[in-house]
Image: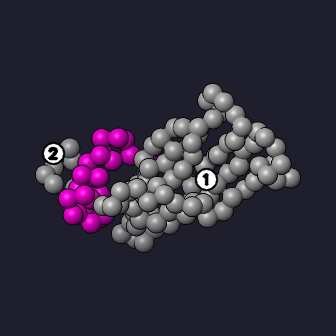
Amino acid sequence: MKTIHIEKTKGYSGKAAGKTWVAKITADGLEFLTADEIDYGTGREWLRREKATRIDTFHLTNGLYEVCEIGERYFRLVWTKDDGSTGSMALDDDRAARMVVLINSGYDFDEAREKSKTKNFSA
């Protein structure tokens, strides 16, 4: 399991504004996750002020995730290594797209992860 913390803002404009979410990519599409923990800040500013920032914590299991933090989108891969520890890495858009094609073609997560390592693959 991999823990990530992402910021969410309210009341701001420009670069400080933007949507924040985490979604697991499955053969059925995006499965949006609910934060496991939310830190509303000292004095719970999120609940009291018009402009505020909070930290959402997600515990990710094996899978491919699309993460959007204040409008900046990226992909995160989480898997279990041979020794039982958790591996986690950011993925570029090309490899994420290859994994999505493989998952949608019926490959399970581990097969898609391995097969997507090469750009020359067949689904």
Q: Circle 2 sits on which residue?
A: 120
Residue at image point 63% right, 27% down:
14
Q: Amino acid at mark 1?
A: His
Left or right: residue 90 versus residue 72 is: left
The single residue placed furthest to the left in the displayed view is 122
The secondary structure that most of the magenta stretch takes on is helix
Does residue 103 show up magenta in the picture? yes
Query: How many other residues sit within 10 Å of disc 1, few (<14), some (14-19) or many (≥20)?
Result: some
Displayed quadrant of residue 9: top right
Residue 12 vs 47, above or below: the answer is above
Which part of the image, by quadrant, shows the C terminus? bottom left
- Percent x, y of residue 102: 23, 56
Q: Amino acid at mark 2?
A: Asn
Residue at image point 33% right, 47% down:
96
Say which element carries label 1. Answer: strand
Displayed quadrant of residue 19: top right
Question: Which residues fall within the magenta stretch?
Answer: 90-114
The disc placed on residue 5 is: 1
